[in-house]
Image: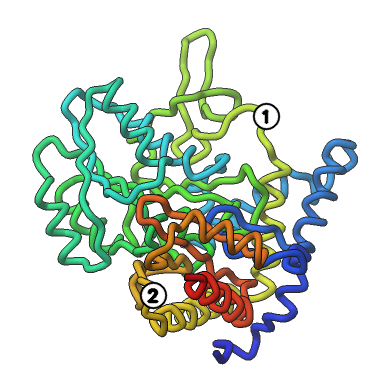
Amino acid sequence: MQTPTNHYDIAKVREAFPVLKKFYYLNVGTYGVMPEPALNEFIAIQIDSEHGSRRNNANNPWTRTEDTRRQIAALIGAVPEEIAFTRNATDGINLVLAGIDWKPGDEVITTAQEHEAMNHPLLYLQKTKGIKARFVEVSPEPQVMLARIQSVYNSKTRLIAMSFITCETGIRLPAKEICAWAAEHNLLTLFDGAQATGAFSVNVRELGCDFYASNGHKWLCGPKGTGIFFVKKEKVDVLSPAHVGAGSLEKVDLATGQADPWMTAQRFEFGTRAWSLTAGLGCSLSWFDSLGWKNVYDYIASLTGYFKQRILERSYLQLLTPVEFEKSSGLTSFVINGRIAGEASRTLWEKSKMMVRVIPHYNAIRISTAHFVSEQDIDKLMEALDSIHNEG
């Protein structure tokens, strides 16, 4: 495989991840790894924050958090006022699902391949608010997906809530077309971007979604406990904050009882928060900036294509993810015919020190071809899979 750009030096990129000297890390789709320069900067910010020595300079966590907000907004095509920081994508999903004024019988259209981050709060709303979740099978094809959505749509539908990239099979949903259809039917849209942000270019303005939840600890390789939530400025007042505290209200008057939330995403931030964590996310974003985001995206796409071709060369492997990168992402799921995925995963770790993800529902293995994974890593993985297949 030829690297997609002369400006992307994979050997140098890998130097920023000492963990790669210990084992093959193929699971960024679950947890990313902070690049060492960003990690060191983050630790320094955390130490200085606890020591109180940077409270009044431009490198304090509060100032750096606002820098991170601008970085995230630029990365996904938003404006800073539309970005709130959370702990993870689940937080952002809950801001929407808990913030809508539901009536018994209201309906939400979602998919049959959602993460617990979406499924669990929807099920809880069914139990506590009397709403109904409608599940459809996924497809990367716009007309197919829209037909499936149309088949369960009715006058009670209020929200479409789905993953941009499905966590189980890595299918990229036609979010832009879904959002356009939803707008025509006066429906709100929420997309879970946990497996999209940092893996390929995402522009929420072009997608047309009302809400977008993601995290910093997967493909963005930020600290664990960092998440981002986008709310379109025109839809801010659609959501009532489930939690309110110092910082979330623009106008407050104890005498009159006035309590007006900000008409920005700031309404979802309150109280003392983990500013050092969000500052640390900015450190990772700056490291990616130094590589060039297009270079990162091109590399992930190219390496993912290489990996899928290696899978297709083997008759004992069944590819579950679309071949085309435009219909998928950096996640690739496959079945080892005649093998139990959990057992194969243990073998990969015990014999080859390869960390992968098991998808029990499909008896599949999921691989994340992240920005630091090399062609040689993929070759070693294929050798290990061949060995598992040839064992009997």
Q: Position of residue 378 (x, y in %)?
A: 57, 77
Amino acid type, mark 1: Thr
What is the spatial separation of the Cα atoms under label 2 and label 1, in whole angstroms? 53 Å
- Left or right? Give the position of 107 relative to 213: left
Amino acid type, mark 2: Tyr
Residue in view at x 17 percent, y 39 percent: 157
- At numbered mark 1, what does the secondary structure look like: helix, strand or loop? loop
Query: Is 160 situated above or below 329?
Result: above
**Within the image, what quadrant is residue 373 found in?**
bottom right
For residue 272, which numbered disc appears in the image?
1
- At numbered mark 2, what does the secondary structure look like: helix, strand or loop? loop
- Left or right? Give the position of 384 relative to 177: right
Crowd class of label 2 (few under 14; some 14 to 19; many from 20; radius 10 Å): some
Residue in view at x 81 percent, y 43 percent: 46
- Residue lying farthest to the top in this orientation: 255
Query: Is 326 situated above or below 222?
Result: below
For residue 316, which numbered disc appears in the image?
2
